[in-house]
Amino acid sequence: MTLPGLESADADRSSITLADHVDAICEAVAAAGPPVVLAMHSAAGVPGYAVSDRIPEQIAAMVYVDSGPATGALNPDLTAVEVPLPSREELEEEENLDGLTEEQLETFRRRAVPEPGAALREGPVLTNDARLDVPSTVVCTGYTSEQVKDAVKEGYAWLGGLAELHDVTYVDLPTSHWPMWSRPHELAAVIGDVAQGASGS
């Protein structure tokens, strides 16, 4: 789904909040009808975890793709209205680009839309312990599962939920931060397996 403020490069992101993203995902879950397998990528782990807190009874399983169930803001000190895609040089320093072709990178940059600043600056509201029982799968692409587990021990907020969830499965899928581009069939198979398991079939 396309979250509020990400409709196009020209969209007005100045008033978009993290709560807007949470509300939009909750509405999509309600429209789909439970039980839902909710797959989140990258920064969407923040609103995704908040959704599992708000409506855990409607979610059969969570899938975090090179992401995690965040318990705090990703960038609490951010003041910008929006954050555009970094330059190619910055991306190579910050993210894993393994498996992405030059054509994919060019297409990706052409389609890229800035992220609303408030969605990165604000943290999730977490009050419902029922979220802790939602089965969660972490698809580790840019980092290995062992690196993710070490980062959890170090207390990174973007992975905070992994220290408290009761049912977490790690799947290693070595590739870029964007496996939907670099290993789409394998990623689809992982999510499909989660969905099949959640349905009991």
Image (spheres, helix red, strand yellow):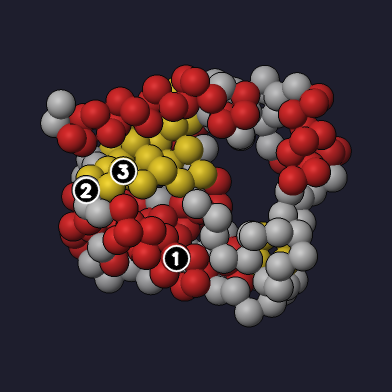
Identify the residue at horizontal 81%, vertical 34% (top origin).
106
Residue where numbered disc 3 is placed: 37
Q: Which mark is residue 24?
A: 1
Give the image quarter of residue 9: bottom right
In percent of width and height, residue 107 lies at 77, 36
Give the image quarter of residue 27: bottom left
Identify the residue at horizontal 79%, vertical 42% (top origin).
109
> Which class describes the residues within 10 Å of circle 2: few (<14), some (14-19), or many (20+)?
some
Residue where numbered disc 2 is placed: 35
Instruction: Locate residue 99 relative to residue 126 in the image: left or right.
Output: right
Instruction: Inspect the image, locate mark 3, and give the three-letter code of the amino acid beneath it.
Output: Val
In percent of width and height, residue 121 lies at 60, 69
Above or below: residue 87 compared with residue 177: below
Q: Secondary structure at mark 2?
A: loop
C-alpha separation, residue under disc 1 versus residue under disc 2: 17 Å
Q: Secondary structure at mark 3?
A: strand
Label 3 near label 2: C-beta < 8 Å? yes
Above or below: residue 124 compared with residue 200: below
